[in-house]
């Protein structure tokens, strides 16, 4: 078991949405909240970060307002302007891929693969390419559209990778020191289980959350996926179907 694994507290369903708490090396805490599909939230030092908020996945009107919102790409199950409107306040930093930014109603930062942003004190966001490589899937997430995944770095010493919709790609080889990875397992649009294993073998995260694995025609058998990946990393299964 890695040091990071030992810093996780037990998940709790006492609230409306399940979450995991992590105690970081400097004594601060970070909370991961799991909604559904590709929608998650991160709370860190009183800051609220939302990734791909979509209205059908959570009641965003009832949740704390966002300090940072990240959008990976423009598909309806990742980019929902109504959910963003429910979360944003005057100071919210909204980081979007190029295509989402082009149709955005309001101010946002356009993130291209390779770009870095510092949307709040103690937090950096690096945009990572996300695209299909299999010939039969190129139309879903073409490379030239410049969709994004993100690496969120926290001053307390934690790095979280959010894959967005992608297959294993060469750009993953530049990722380093990833503590937690959210990697898509939605077939037939992104990764098959063997491809998730390939991506994990490249990135080597200490902890993996498969996500985006159920709202499709071919739901992933996540227990089989856990067995496949257990030699490489700790797999934590949460309601991210």
Image: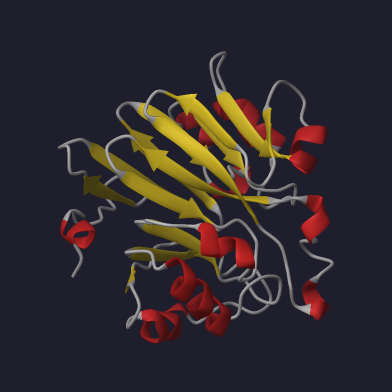
* 64 and 139: which is toward the camera: 139
Q: Is the N terminus in the top left, top right, bottom left or bottom right quadrant?
A: bottom left
Indicate the position of residue 7 as horizontal and vertical percent values: 17, 53
222 versus 207 height, above or below: below
Q: Residue furthest front?
A: 174
Q: Residue furthest top?
A: 90
Indicate the position of residue 165 as horizontal and vertical percent values: 65, 60
- Identify which residue is drawn at 63% across, 68% down: 169
- Identify which residue is drawn at 56% across, 55% down: 38
176 versus 41 height, above or below: below
Residue 20 located left or right of residue 184: left
Colour option used: secondary structure
- Picture quarter containing residue 138? bottom right
Q: Is residue 65 visible?
A: no
Report the number of numbered marks: 0
Q: Is residue 224 visible?
A: yes
Indicate the position of residue 84 as horizontal and vertical percent values: 62, 32
124 versus 8 height, above or below: above
Indicate the position of residue 121 as horizontal and vertical percent values: 39, 23
154 versus 189 height, above or below: above
Residue 170 located left or right of residue 226: right
């Amino acid at each position: 078991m890695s040091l990071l694994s030992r810093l996780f507290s037990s998940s709790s369903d006492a609230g409306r949405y399940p979450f995991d708490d992590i105690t970081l090396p400097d004594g601060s805490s970070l909370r991961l909240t799991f909604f559904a599909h590709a929608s998650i939230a991160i709370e860190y030092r009183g800051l609220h970060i939302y990734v791909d908020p979509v209205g059908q996945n959570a009641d965003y009107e009832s949740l704390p307002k966002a300090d940072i919102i990240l959008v990976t790409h423009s598909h309806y199950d990742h980019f929902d302007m109504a959910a963003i409107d429910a979360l944003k306040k005057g100071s919210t930093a909204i980081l979007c891929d190029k295509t989402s930014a082009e149709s955005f109603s309001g101010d946002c930062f356009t993130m291209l693969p390779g770009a870095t942003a510092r949307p709040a004190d103690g937090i950096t966001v690096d945009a990572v390419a996300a695209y299909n490589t299999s010939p039969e899937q190129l139309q879903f997430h073409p490379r030239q559209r410049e969709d994004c995944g993100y690496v969120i770095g926290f001053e307390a010493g934690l790095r979280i990778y959010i894959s967005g919709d992608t297959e294993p790609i060469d750009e993953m080889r530049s990722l380093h020191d990833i503590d937690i990875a959210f990697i898509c397992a939605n077939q037939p649009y992104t990764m098959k289980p063997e491809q998730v294993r390939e991506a994990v073998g490249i990135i080597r995260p200490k902890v993996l959350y498969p996500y985006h694995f159920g709202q499709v025609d071919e739901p992933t058998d996540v227990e089989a996926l856990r067995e496949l990946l257990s030699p490489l990393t700790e797999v934590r299964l949460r309601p991210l179907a």
